Image: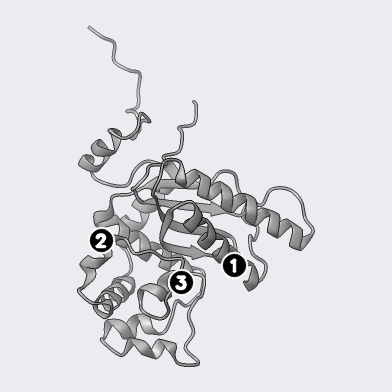
């Protein structure tokens, strides 16, 4: 069976993932992820791709992206892949591929899946044993979020979590307009987002996100999928099992 083409739709949010080949590291030291972050920022500006959330781990990268022009997502990910591999191979005197095949991606319906997907990305850090911050729970309780800027407070620096809970201003991140629904002020939005992270996702939500990422099918309701189908000739739902019905 021929592989379906990857969706690359302007003005639609995409969840993308790229992994190291055979589970091998794509970053051997913290400075490598610094290079990754600067590369993403450069390409997001030059190719007009908005980054709403991200998590850079030692063996994989996840992000929520909105390309603003036709072909923007593919150009962005190809640029990341090519330029980062050149840096990594040169630094570590290696050759060959770094990535586990093509990047995975799926489009998603903003309401309700954007915030849930951002929480999913944050959960990847915690699942890897990387504490996001001390303040996630504190913010939800209404304590002073500016404590995050004092010495000794730690947070995982290669994630958008710190930006969304008010720990730092991340130049890589661009807010999706739906974030305004979390509150009327930055502080309200930070508190409510931290509260969502603290609640975590249900098993069904996690399975839905991971299934969409694995299959490439859109994540959303029937109306969302029907509207998407108007934008692309690519099939957006799996065929029913069995032989196709013959015409009468």
Kindly give the residue lying farthest to the front in the view shown.
46
Residue 152 position in % (x across, y down): 50, 92
Quick one: quadrant of the C terminus?
A: top left
Q: If you read the primary sequence from the N terminus, does the residue marked by circle 1 or circle 3 appear first?
A: 1
For the residue carrying disc 2, how many other residues have a C-alpha within 10 Å: few (<14), some (14-19), or many (20+)?
A: few
| Badge nearest the viewer, 2 or 3 | 2
Is the residue under label 2 in contact with that under label 1 (CB below 8 Å)? no
Marks 1/3: CA distance?
18 Å
**Left or right: 210, with 247 as reference point:** right
Residue in view at x 22 percent, y 40 percent:
222
Residue 55 position in % (x across, y down): 48, 64
Task: Please tell me which residue lies in front, 64 or 3.
Answer: 64
Q: Helix or strand or loop: what does disc 2 sit on?
A: helix
**Left or right: 182, with 35 as reference point:** left
Marks 1/2: CA distance?
28 Å
Kindly give the residue lying farthest to the bottom in the view shown.
151
Q: Helix or strand or loop: what does disc 1 sit on?
A: helix
Where does label 2 land, which residue? Answer: 178
Residue 96 position in % (x across, y down): 73, 48
Q: Is residue 143 above or below residue 35?
A: below
Q: Is residue 111 above or below residue 245?
A: below
Where does label 3 land, which residue? Answer: 126
Where does label 1 land, which residue? Answer: 33
Is the residue under label 3 in contact with that under label 1 (CB below 8 Å)? no
For the residue carrying disc 3, how many other residues have a C-alpha within 10 Å: few (<14), some (14-19), or many (20+)?
A: some
| Badge nearest the viewer, 1 or 3 | 1
Residue 240 got which mark?
Answer: none
Residue in view at x 33 percent, y 68 percent:
200
Kindly give the residue lying farthest to the right in the view shown.
93
| Label tally | 3
Kindly give the residue lying farthest to the top in the view shown.
248
């Amino acid at each position: 069976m021929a592989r379906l083409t990857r969706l690359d739709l302007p003005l639609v949010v995409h969840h993308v993932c790229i992994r190291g080949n055979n589970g091998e590291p794509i970053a051997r030291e913290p400075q490598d992820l610094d290079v990754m972050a600067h590369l993403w920022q450069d390409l997001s500006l030059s190719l007009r791709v908005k980054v709403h959330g991200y998590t850079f781990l030692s063996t994989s990268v996840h992000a929520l992206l909105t390309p603003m022009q036709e072909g923007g997502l593919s150009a962005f990910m190809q640029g990341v892949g090519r330029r980062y591999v050149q840096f990594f191979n040169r630094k570590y005197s290696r050759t060959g591929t770094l990535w586990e095949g093509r990047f995975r991606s799926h489009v998603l319906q903003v309401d309700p899946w954007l915030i849930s997907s951002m929480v999913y990305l944050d959960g990847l850090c915690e699942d890897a044993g990387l504490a996001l911050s001390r303040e996630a729970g504190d913010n939800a309780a209404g304590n002073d979020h500016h404590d995050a800027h004092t010495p000794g407070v730690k947070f995982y620096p290669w994630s958008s979590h710190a930006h969304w809970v008010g720990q730092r201003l991340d130049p890589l991140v661009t807010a999706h307009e739906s974030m305004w629904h979390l509150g009327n002020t930055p502080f309200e939005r930070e508190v409510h987002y931290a509260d969502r992270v603290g609640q975590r996702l249900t098993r069904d939500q996690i399975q839905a996100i991971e299934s969409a990422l694995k299959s490439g099918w859109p994540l959303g309701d029937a109306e969302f999928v029907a509207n998407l189908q108007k934008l692309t000739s690519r099939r957006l739902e799996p065929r029913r099992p069995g032989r196709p019905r013959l015409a009468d």
